[in-house]
Amino acid sequence: MNFLIDFFSSTQVSLGEKIFWSMWVSIGFAVIFRTPKRSMWVVAVLGAIGFSCRAFLLIYFKDQIVFASFTAASLVGVLGVYFAHKVHTPPIVFTIPAVINIIPGKPGYEFMISLIEVISLKEGEVLQFEYLVEMIEKSARTGFTLLSLAFGVVFPLLIFKTASVKKTSLNQFFINKNKNI
């Protein structure tokens, strides 16, 4: 397990290799979620785009994982609405597997370890204030990152104000918006 954590946080592994493996992670979850075969290429493309967007944003905005995850999930959501017309599939079918590789596994793992450390104090041991603050900080960071992923995927559907993207084309949306200006 530590090998995987070291692999995705290592600087020795190129970003291209990480993007390649993130595509396969997305495809794997798409298979589990029974995504139609005609949509698998979209899942791979969106998974790679989402992971690379978050990775590039984390390079330029250090420690801004919530912002980077929201931006990447929003990009995946917008492109999911676009690709929904190309493969005739609801966008949620391939956007959810595509953002799974953006979920912050290491901060979630660190939060669970700090929670166990706080809970497993023996009777008579004093709870260090630093441990409690560290646990709360890790839980808030992980929780807000997961919320940003969820909102980022749903964000395009909220903008386009539609329950179904079948009658919503992004090209038509932008053409109509430009006519109103």
Image: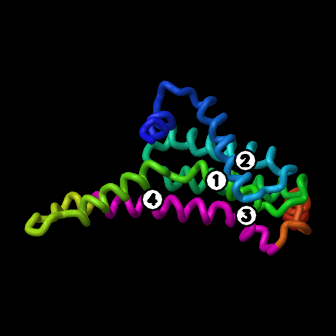
Q: Residues within 10 Å of mark 3 (few under 14, many from 20)?
A: some
Secondary element at tag 3: helix
Sequence-wise, the earlier of marks 2 and 4 is 2
Q: Which mark is residue 99?
A: 1
Which stretch is magenta?
134-163
Q: Which mark is residue 179?
A: none
**Residue 101 painted magenta:** no
Q: Residues within 10 Å of mark 1 (few under 14, many from 20)?
A: many
Q: Give the alpha-carbon distance from disc 3 to disc 1, as whole Å.
A: 14 Å
Residue type indicated by callout 3: Pro
Check whether the beta carbons of the residues at disc 2 and disc 4 lie within 8 A of each other: no
Secondary element at tag 2: helix
| Residue pointed to by mark 4 | 142
| Residue pointed to by mark 2 | 46
Q: Residue at x 45, y 35 (%)?
A: 3
Sequence-wise, the earlier of marks 1 and 4 is 1
Q: Residue at x 63, y 37 (%)?
A: 21
